[in-house]
Each structure stands twice: as C-alpha cells, then as structure tokens.
C-alpha cells in the first residue's frame, strides 16, 4: 500500500500543468527526453572545459562562448537553440532528430579542439 501511494505521488508530481515554463504539448516523458538532451550537451561542455554555471541561462552561456570566440561556439549555440525550441517552443523532436542531436553532442565532446582558457 505504501508503494502504491508513493507511485501515485510520483505520478502526480510528473504531471505538467500548463505554464509559461512547461507548454501543455509536452507530456512528462517528452519533457524528460528533451531535458536529457540538454544534460548531454552540458556534460560535453564540461568535458570541453566550458561548463555552464547554474545561474547562467543556456542561451546566455552559448552566446557568451560565441562572443569569446570559442571554436565550437556556433555548434553549441545551434544545439542550444534546438533544445530551447523543443523545451519551450512548439517543436517536438522525433526519434531521428533526437539521435542526430546526440550524435552532434558526441562529436562536439570528442572534437580535437583545445578547450577555451
């Protein structure tokens, strides 16, 4: 009974109420997949020596890297924009687009460019 109550509470917590931060078109599973894409990008950025501080918005971080002349800033900005469109816009990524996003993140992480700094 306790397990069932915990499951119901978790399920309720994952339900997304319409708000400016969580568009109603995003189901909980879709939201989790979308956030996971950006988390992968954040891990790649940390591996490249340019982690995003939690106080810095994703787009602000990508634009700052572009301003600083980071050699991969254009790709970082493009990936960030795809994430923001999927997270807050009306664009849903299909399986092919998600795989392509992750492929691009992996290429970014494994590139031979020296980290900025």
Image (spheres, helix red, strand yellow):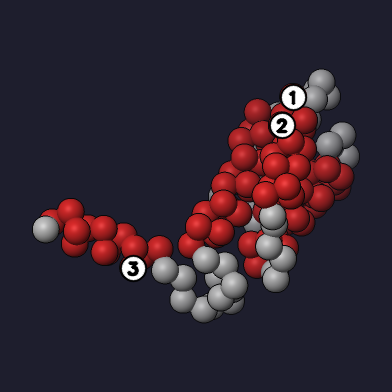
Q: Who's the residue at 67% across and 34% down the image?
A: 44
Measure the alpha-carbon separation of dots 3 and 1. Answer: 39 Å
- The residue indicated by pointer 3 is 12
Quadrant housing residue 108: top right
| Crowdedness near tag 3: few (<14), some (14–19) or many (≥20) residues, C-alpha within 10 Å | few
Kindly indicate whether the residue at mark 2 contacts the one at mark 1 (C-beta within 8 angstroms). Answer: yes
* Quarter the N terminus occupies: bottom left
Kindly indicate whether the residue at mark 1 contacts the one at mark 3 (C-beta within 8 angstroms). Answer: no
Q: Position of residue 50 (x, y in %)?
A: 69, 35
At numbered mark 3, what does the secondary structure look like: helix, strand or loop?
A: helix
Q: Is residue 76 left or right of residue 94?
A: right
Please indicate, yes or no, whether residue 33 appears anywhere in the rendered image. Answer: yes
Q: Position of residue 18 (x, y in %)?
A: 52, 78
Quadrant housing residue 9: bottom left
Residue 110, numbered label: 1
At numbered mark 1, what does the secondary structure look like: helix, strand or loop?
A: helix
Of marks 3 and 2, which one's residue comes earlier in the chain? Answer: 3
* Quarter the C terminus occupies: top right
Quadrant housing residue 99: top right
Q: Who's the residue at 84% across and 36% down the image?
A: 72
Q: Who's the residue at 68% across and 62% down the image?
A: 92
On screen, 44 above or below 67? above
| Crowdedness near tag 2: few (<14), some (14–19) or many (≥20) residues, C-alpha within 10 Å | some
Towards the viewer: 72 or 31:
31
Measure the alpha-carbon separation of dots 1 and 2. Answer: 6 Å
- The residue indicated by pointer 2 is 106
Measure the alpha-carbon separation of dots 3 and 2. Answer: 34 Å
Kindly indicate whether the residue at mark 2 contacts the one at mark 3 (C-beta within 8 angstroms). Answer: no
């Amino acid at each position: 009974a306790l397990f069932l109550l915990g499951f119901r509470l978790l399920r309720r917590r994952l339900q997304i109420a319409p708000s400016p931060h969580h568009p109603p078109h995003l189901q909980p599973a879709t939201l989790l997949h979308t956030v996971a894409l950006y988390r992968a990008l954040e891990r790649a950025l940390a591996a490249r020596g340019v982690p995003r501080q939690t106080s810095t918005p994703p787009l602000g971080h990508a634009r700052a890297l572009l301003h600083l002349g980071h050699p991969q800033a254009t790709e970082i900005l493009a990936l960030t924009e795809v994430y923001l469109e999927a997270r807050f816009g009306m664009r849903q990524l299909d399986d092919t687009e998600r795989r392509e996003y992750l492929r691009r993140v992996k290429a970014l992480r494994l590139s031979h460019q020296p980290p900025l700094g």
